[in-house]
Image: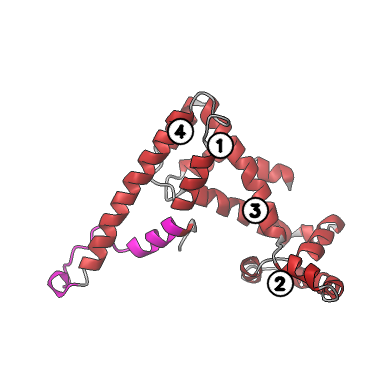
Amino acid sequence: MRNDICTIPVNEVFEVQDGCPICRMYKTVEDHILEYIMGAAMMEPDVRIETNRQGFCADHFDKMMARRGRLSLALMLESHVAEMEKAIKSPSKAREIEKDCFVCNKIEWGMSRMLDTLLRSYETDRDFRELFDSQPQFCLKHYNMLSALGDKKHLRRYHKDFQKSLYRITSEYHKSLTADLNKYCSMYDYRNSGENADWGNSRDAVERAVGYLTGRIID
């Protein structure tokens, strides 16, 4: 599991150049972990101890139920629910478990290592800096996150270049998205309607705006 997450190449995430690369990175890590937990991991004693203790958040329960292998989920639930018998005797412990999630914790672990790799690559690899600079966008959530990470402490030589590139990419996309939203709204004016109405790039502006504001990939 550890090796699998660490060997996900950061370059591959950035080479796609479609949407926010950090959103894509998050989804890659999340899919990796969901595949892992719904597979052979359910029979690993140390993993079952963790899932029994931590449980899962509602979002990841939904995502596991949408996948194949419901028996894997049922087996984890069987032992987790049994473990919860102890928790209901202690309301404070039950509240702690309610806020916990095995998948979220593993994603946080995996993302921290991939972001370390991202910063190290930017600092040491000119090709990666060029790849970073060519990205079409960063969502607001990950813009803020990268802006906080890309300081002089983490990027001794290139922190100014990193911040400048990050700001340029995000501000340009913000302006473009604003124009597309304006266009989308204007298309509902009867004067712009009709079979040959030109929507330009605005048809998916709502989905892109939600993704931009929330840091989630909207299908």
* Secondary structure found at label 3: helix
Q: Residues within 10 Å of mark 4 (few under 14, many from 20)?
A: many
- In the rendered image, which residue does mark 2 sit on? 70
190 or 164, nearer to the observer: 164
Residue 121 appears in which quarter of the rendering? top right
Q: Residues within 10 Å of mark 1 (few under 14, many from 20)?
A: some
Contact between marks 1 and 3 (CB within 8 A): the answer is: no
Residue 57 appears in which quarter of the rendering? bottom right
Q: Along the polypeptide, which appears first: circle 1 or circle 3? A: 3
- State the mark number for residue 80: none
Q: Along the polypeptide, which appears first: circle 4 or circle 1? A: 1
Q: Which segment is the magenta one? A: 189-213
Q: Calculate the distance from the C-alpha at mark 1 to the C-alpha at mark 2.
A: 35 Å
Q: Which mark lies nearer to you, 4 or 2?
A: 4
- In the rendered image, which residue does mark 4 sit on? 162
What residue is shown at x 80% (from left), y 68% (from top)?
93
Residue 4 spot, x, y in % from top left:
69, 45
- In the rendered image, which residue does mark 1 sit on? 118
Q: Along the polypeptide, which appears first: circle 2 or circle 3? A: 3
84 or 19, nearer to the observer: 84
Q: Along the polypeptide, which appears first: circle 1 or circle 2? A: 2
- In the rendered image, which residue does mark 3 sit on? 32
Q: Inspect the magenta stretch and tell me whether residue 197 lies in it.
A: yes
Q: Calculate the distance from the C-alpha at mark 4 to the C-alpha at mark 2.
A: 44 Å
Instruction: Answer yes or no: is residue 27 visible.
Output: yes
152 or 206, nearer to the observer: 152
Query: Would residue 185 be found to the left or right of residue 13 on screen?
Result: left
Q: Inspect the magenta stretch and tell me whether residue 1 lies in it.
A: no
**Label 4 amino acid?**
Phe
